[in-house]
Image (cartoon, rainbow, N blue to C red):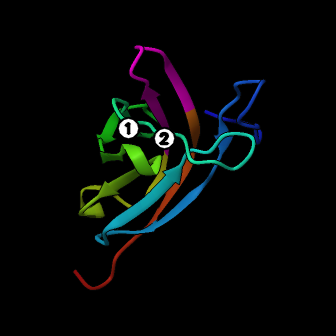
Amino acid sequence: DFPQQGTIGASLKPQRYDIEIYQGDTFKFSLVFKDSLGVVINITGWTGIVQFKDVATSALEATPVVTIDGPAGKATITIADTGVLDAGEYKYDVQFTDAGGNKRTYIGGKITVTEDVSE
């Protein structure tokens, strides 16, 4: 859980990014990695993991797919059908392992899922 917004950088604190999802819809977002000059970092060989957990119980509710486009420095996180999530509050974080085996959590926060009416 990330109680306050952090800054990605020298402090190594994950950035807080809260998400709102409409139940049953496809949800997708991307991260592009750049150096301090704004130049894209090649993330070939990196892997990523994202997990959604229930705020109250910490039970694992979903594991979105992470797709890496290394030369573009881009990681795309997708959950094809958010219908697996009940309406309510969840927490998540996004952790990457670089080609050298180093792990780092870049973002995390809360997810609010709004109940779908038409499914």
Q: Is residue 55 left or right of residue 1?
A: left
The residue lying toward the viewer, choosing from 81 and 43, is: 43
Does the magenta portion include 102? yes
Which residue is pictured at 44% across the width and 30% down the height? 96
Residue 62 at x, y = what percent?
30, 44
Which residue is pictured at 67% across the width and 40% down the height? 35
Q: What is the secondary structure assignment of the residue under circle 2?
A: strand
Q: Would you call the spot at circle 2 few (<14 residues within 10 Å), some (14-19), or many (20 or more)?
A: many
Lower position in the chain sequence, tag 2 or tag 1:
1
Give the residues in magenta. 91-105
Amino acid carrying label 2: it is Tyr
Q: Residue at the top extreme?
A: 101
Q: How many marks?
A: 2
Does the magenta portion include 89? no
Residue 63's tag is none
Q: Would you call the spot at circle 1 few (<14 residues within 10 Å), some (14-19), or many (20 or more)?
A: some
Q: Quadrant of the image for the N terminus?
A: top right
- Pointer 2 residue: 92
Amino acid carrying label 1: it is Gln
Q: Is residue 69 left or right of residue 9?
A: left
Q: Are marks 2 and 1 in contact (CB under 8 Å)?
A: yes
Q: Is residue 34 left or right of residue 72?
A: right
Which residue is pictured at 38% across the width and 43% down the height? 70
Residue 114 at x, y = what percent?
45, 69
- Pointer 1 residue: 51
Task: Give the image quarter of residue 63.
Answer: top left
